[in-house]
Each structure stands twice: as C-alpha cells, then as structure tokens.
Image (tube, grey):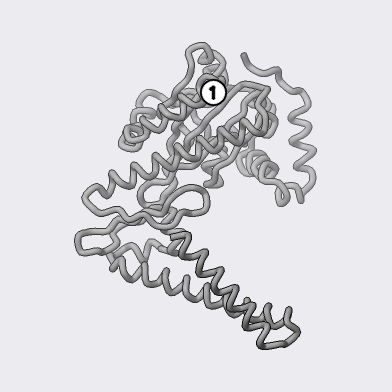
Amino acid sequence: MMASQGPHHADLVYATLSDRAAAAQSAVAASWSRSLRKHGLDPNHDRPPRRLSGAEFAFAFERLEHLVRLAQPAIDRLFQAVGEAGCCVLLTDGAGVPLDRRGVAGDDVDFLGYGLWTGMVWSEASEGTNGVGTCLAEGRPLTIHRDQHFLTRNIGLSCTVAPIFDADGRLAGALDVSTCRSDLTPAMLKLIAAATGDAAHRIEARHFRETYRHARVVVGPDNGRGANGLLAVDREDLVIGANRAARMAYGLTEARLARPFPADDLLAERAAEDHQAFAAAERGAVQRALARAGGNVSAAARRATLHRKLARLGREGGR
C-alpha cells in the first residue's frame, strides 16, 4: 500500500534548500538541490516513474545482458536474505533502469504501485533523490530512507543501494534493496547495506574474472570497503586489466593501462611505497622517543628498538 502522502514534505524540502549552506553540509540536501535546481523537479510531482517502451527496454537489457546473467547467483542469494523481510531486489543499468528484480508475490502490488519494477526509470534526473538514482549520481553506496526522498510520493520507501563497476572500472549499474516497511531499525539498515555491498562486490568480481577468463587473476589489496583489487595478468606476466579497487589501490590510470606492462613493476612500486612508509614511521618513532626521553639518546634508542620490534612483528603476523 502506498504511504500516506506527507503534506508537509515539500515544505521541508523548500525550507531546507532556502539555506544555501545546506547542500554543503548534507549529502541529502545536496541531492535535493540537484533535483530542484538542476533537474527542475517538483517535490509534489505525483506521477509514477516513466516506463520504457518494449523496444527501449530490450535495447537497455541487451547492452548489459552479460552482466545480468553473471549476477543471477548473487541476486538470488541476496533475495534469500532480505525477501522475507518485505524487501525487493533490483539490478539496474547505469541509467537507473531495473533490468532484473526479485520480490515476494504478496508484496508485488505495493512495489508495482511505487514503480519498483523492471523497465521503470529511477535516475535522479527523473525521480529526484532516490536510492538508485542518487547512488548512480554519486557513485557510492548509500541508503535513502523514507522522507530523505525528494518526491513526496516516494517517502514511504527505504532504499539501500550499492554501485556496480564493470571489469574496466566504469560505473555499470546498481544493486538495490527496497522496502515499504516503516519499522526498519538502524541496525537492520546496516545489515541490509552490508549484504547489498557484499552482493555487488561478488557481481563485480565474477564479471571481472569472466571478462579476463583467459588470463591469470591476481588478488591485490582491498579498497577499504570490502572489494578486493583484481589484476588480470597474461602469460608473459604483463598486466592487461585491473578492476576499480586495484586501480584505486595502485593509482592506475587509463593511460597506464592502455599498454600492457610487467606485473613485477607494479608490485615493486607498491613494495617501495610500503618501505618508504615504514621508514617514515620509524623516523617518527625515534623523534617521539627522544621527546619522551627528554633528549636522553640511550633511553630513546631503547624505546625506538622496542617500537621497531613491535612494528615488524605486526607486519609479519599480518602476512
């Protein structure tokens, strides 16, 4: 059932945006600002999302069919985790159009009423601040919870979304878990966000491995958000591909990846950076030890030696 329309939601949007500093202080306010000022949307706009024609949807699906096929196990697994909690799962393209979905039959009437269905357009330009559209606009995982939506008609939704990047690090689409439930706790939202992010990373990794199935895939450092850096290396040990996490971890640009280069060069550069960072940490330890010892070099040396032993123990233990 559609949520009751909050008559004061539009007033809240306009009042928030009357403060020019709001967009700089809040990501939601920044998205509201884009919705109103860049896209010219009205928060009281009450029409459902635009639906693509059959031909338009077929074209959109064909462009991403390979990724949709590879994503099936991850989507199924995610839906098994959240479906009974009143959630649907959507896989969208980069334009915010759901190409595949999962939902419990008993909830489908509500989700269809909101337009959470394949072939509907959920870009930020079309629907204002919303999980899918804002995730794609900002290229980051997020949750748009109920009255954080721009349009009043959407404030009954809570949408948790993770971006999906293709094998070349380009934003390809998004994975969305949406619900009409009003009783979601912050703890539940965190669990849904973790499950959604994990599923998105699985899709990305499978797509990368399939794209470079004739190469050897080397697992590198993660990006701090749960996605491992992946490098594709050919028979000559030349790097021929890198996913987004690896590009960020190693500072790889399109220009660097335009021509294959020895994997050893990349690993040597990383080792040199690690060595420099460790040396800087040791110098800092010596300076702090001297300061604490009041300039007593002997005492400072003992402190610095202890620091080095502990640091090396930590490095070796983490291998």
Q: Is residue 111 left or right of residue 92?
A: right
The quarter in which the C terminus is drawn is: bottom left
x then y, percent, for residue 44:
69, 27
Find residue 153 and report its horizontal and vertical position in percent: 65, 24
Residue 200 seen in this snapshot: yes
Which of 265/281 is in front? 281
Instruction: Report which residue position mark 1 lands on.
Output: 87
Report x, y in % for residue 6.
Answer: 74, 23
The amino acid type of the residue labelled 1 equals Cys
For the residue labelled by badge 1, is the local secondary structure a helix, a strand or a loop? Answer: strand
> How many numbered marks does the figure carry?
1
- Locate residue 267: give its quadrant: bottom left
Mark 1 burial class by Cα count in 10 Å: few <14, some 14-19, many 20+? many
Vertical position of residue 258 compared to residue 46: above or below: below
- Residue 204's place in the image compared with 73, above or below, is below
Residue 143's quadrant in the figure?
top right
Residue for point 56% across, 36% down? 193
Say whether residue 296 is left or right of residue 223.
right
Question: Residue at horizontal 45%, vertical 34%?
Answer: 92
Query: Split into 4 quadrants, where in the image is the N terminus?
Result: top right
**Residue drawn at x 78%, y 26% as measured from the top left:** 8
x, y percent for residue 315: 49, 65
Mark yes or no: residue 125 visible: no
Query: Does 196 sit left or right of 238 as displayed?
Result: right
